[in-house]
Amino acid sequence: MQKQDFLEILKNYRDLISPTVIKYVTDSLKFPKYCQIETKYQNLINFQENLILEYPKRLGKYLRPTLLMSTALAMGTTKEEAILGAAAMQLSEEWILIHDDIEDDSEQRRGLPTLQKIYGVPLAINAGDALQVIMWKMIGDIDNKKIFEEFYQLLNRTTLGQTIDIKWNQENKMDITDDDVYLILESKTCYYTISGPMRLGAIMAGANNQELDIIYKFGLNLGRSFQIIDDILDITTDFAGQKKQKYNDIYEGKRTIPLSHLLKRASSDESIEITNILAKSRNEKTEEEVLRIIELMKKYKSIESAKELAIKFSQEAKAILKNEMPFIRVSPYREQLESAIDFIVNRDH
């Protein structure tokens, strides 16, 4: 069967799932009779609604809920059974991004100013908290203990990964290895972006533990590929016009595979120079300093090396899907997951 255009697949699932996301967010402000808000305060309800709908209405790629839906359907469940879990998966991204943007002092999200740049940090934090509350309401409405447990493990591991990432940035840790980077990636990308959504879809379809373990292994490889490509795009593109400022990872001091590659090959003088630049806060770094690190990455072919590594991991993911995942069987949903692999390694945003 001919592979589908994955961008079209993403759009179709986004159109299917996003109304449920918006409905839950809007309905969260319809309080029961015993704690209703007086009508004279309706302007504050309206303000809260606009605040917490800001990111959901911007409509991201919907990669995670798409992987959840494709896996669930490929294993024989229905759209109706999977859609609420997919909406909860997407809403988890919305509140995590709000908090992540604050932690990184990011300027833009999906082509527009970040929430804290519009409303300030306190209100942005509170908006993220509100969306997380709504996400847990969705998960509770699914009424499946295994789904609850998977969401818990998924988000628990993600926050650990963020702790490690921030801690090493604060310490300006320079003796980073690929394994160090993979530790962060496994938590924040492999599990959260690939394995977790797919495992959730599989649980909805009644998967056994062996099948779930294989999905996790698949996600380790595809998640590494996804994040390495993300790191490369941050260096080389503006994410198809969605980001005003390039090189955000360097401005923010992120520990990435291209940076790890560079640090292992730079001269002692260059290493000192890199260390001094990365030790500065985002606002302290000059464009000239950031471009100097890019220049060194090009000198040592760190970007090309990272691309080769991303392709290697995507090929390993393909082999796992082909040889170890016969339970992903129903067409065209199996083919959608095959298309996802190619999209992830070849995308421009």
Image (cartoon, helix red, strand yellow):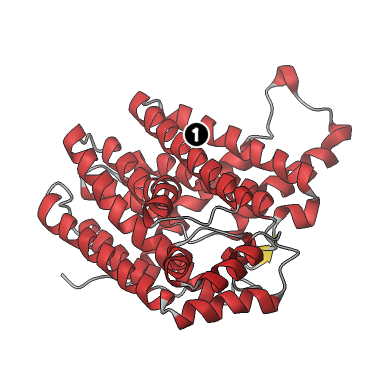
Q: Position of residue 263 (x, y in %)?
A: 47, 66
Residue in front for this viewpoint, 24 or 302: 302
Is 51 on the left-hand or right-hand side of 26? right
Quarter of the rendering containing residue 335: bottom left
What kind of element bears circle 1? helix
Q: Position of residue 254 (x, y in %)?
A: 55, 58
Asked whether the viewer can see residue 161, the reply is yes
Residue in front for this viewpoint, 178 or 98: 178
Taking the spot 34% from the left edge, 70% from the top edge, the residue there is 345
Q: Position of residue 245 (x, y in %)?
A: 65, 73
Q: Which residue is mark 1?
A: 138
The residue under label 1 is which amino acid type? Met
**Residue most extreme to the top:** 34
- In this rendering, the answer to whether 237 lies above or below 181 is below
Residue in front for this viewpoint, 109 or 42: 109
Taking the spot 43% from the left edge, 79% from the top edge, the residue there is 300
Asked whether the viewer can see residue 239, the reply is no
Q: Position of residue 21 (x, y in %)?
A: 53, 46
Quarter of the rendering containing residue 132: top right
Taking the spot 75% from the left edge, 24% from the top edge, the residue there is 36
Residue in front for this viewpoint, 23 or 117: 117
